[in-house]
Image: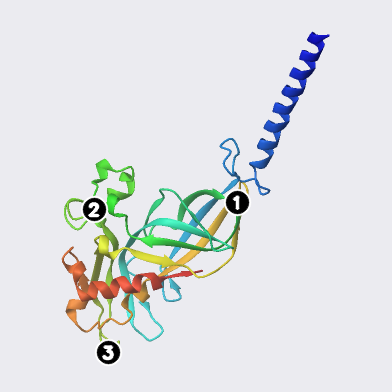
Amino acid sequence: MKRIRKMAVLSLLLMSILITTACKKDKNPSPDGSSNGNNNTTVPTGTLMLHLHTYIEEQEVDLYGIEYTTVEGRIISLNLAQLYIYDIQLMKLDGSLYSVPGRKILKVFEGESYLVGDVPVGNYKSIRFKVGLDATTNALSPANSPDSIILNKPAMWFGSTAQPEGYVFTNIQGTIDTSATMDQTPVPFGYKIGTNANVVQVNMPDQNYSVLTGQTEYCHIIIDYSKLFTGIQLNQTGNLTVSTPADNSSGIASQIKGNIASMFRYE
């Protein structure tokens, strides 16, 4: 009889443990399938891409060296247009942010599609990012960085090597008509913007988009290089060149930096 009672007590104890464990497991997953602390729960993701277009005002740039005329009549051409993007964040509908881990992009004229990565599915209303590189990456030689593929680019160096001066965050070269009458032969300009002080935050306006499980979503953004010259007195020769780290402390570099964020708009 005693043995039967012991067996009954043990059975009840085992059932209690199983029920408690099952209840704990049920509390971890959230209704949308995301994890609230259970490492065994997989968050559904989709792939996000950036599609970055090179423009002069409303005209898409087809090739380097082609002259484009702005609405006001000024001729501009591009011979080089490259920049780094990092610290990509996606803004959810409630205003909270998802930070894409580790992604850095070198936007070159020849390429338009760039992988952001696999991100949680859901509805988003905006995207933000920085133009430049973080201070740690900016102090590393290409050989010592996991981002060596995009850093080993001499066009994005101030000198013959990447260090010790750090990287060029934005390298934009071309020609522009600097005359007030806008009827003269375009002359060369060149802006190498860099140094840790000249990282630019870009906050895109609201434009809702959704990332779906297992699917690819493209975020189409125009980079309008004509915006680079807003407020700059082009008839002053000294305002047409920023080429060294020392130049990056100048007033013209500060003006250029202030114009970079305005170059980005949705397609």
Quadrant in which residue 262 is drawn:
bottom left
Q: Which residue is mark 1?
A: 121
- Which residue type carries mark 1? Val
Q: Which mark is residue 154?
A: 2
Give 159 or 32, whichever is nearer the viewer: 32
The residue indicated by pointer 3 is 180
**Visible in this render: residue 39?**
yes
In the picture, measured across the screen, residue 234 lies left or right of residue 49, that is left
Residue 127: % across, % down: 49, 62
**Earlier-in-chain disc, 3 versus 1:** 1
Q: CA gap, disc 3 to disc 1?
A: 51 Å
Determine the residue positioned at 20% across, 72% down.
241
Secondary element at tag 2: helix
Whether 41 is drawn above or below 14: the answer is below
- Identify the amino acid type marked 2: Pro
- Residue closest to the eye, 187 or 152: 152
Which of discs 1 and 2 lies nearer the camera? The answer is 1
Q: In the image, what residue occupies the spot 17% across and 68% down?
A: 247
Tell me the quarter of the image containing the N terminus: top right
Labelled pair 1, 2 in contact (Cβ < 8 Å)? no
x and y percent of residue 45 in the render? 58, 47
Q: Position of residue 145 (x, y in %)?
A: 29, 43
Distance CA(mark 1)–CA(mark 2)? 38 Å
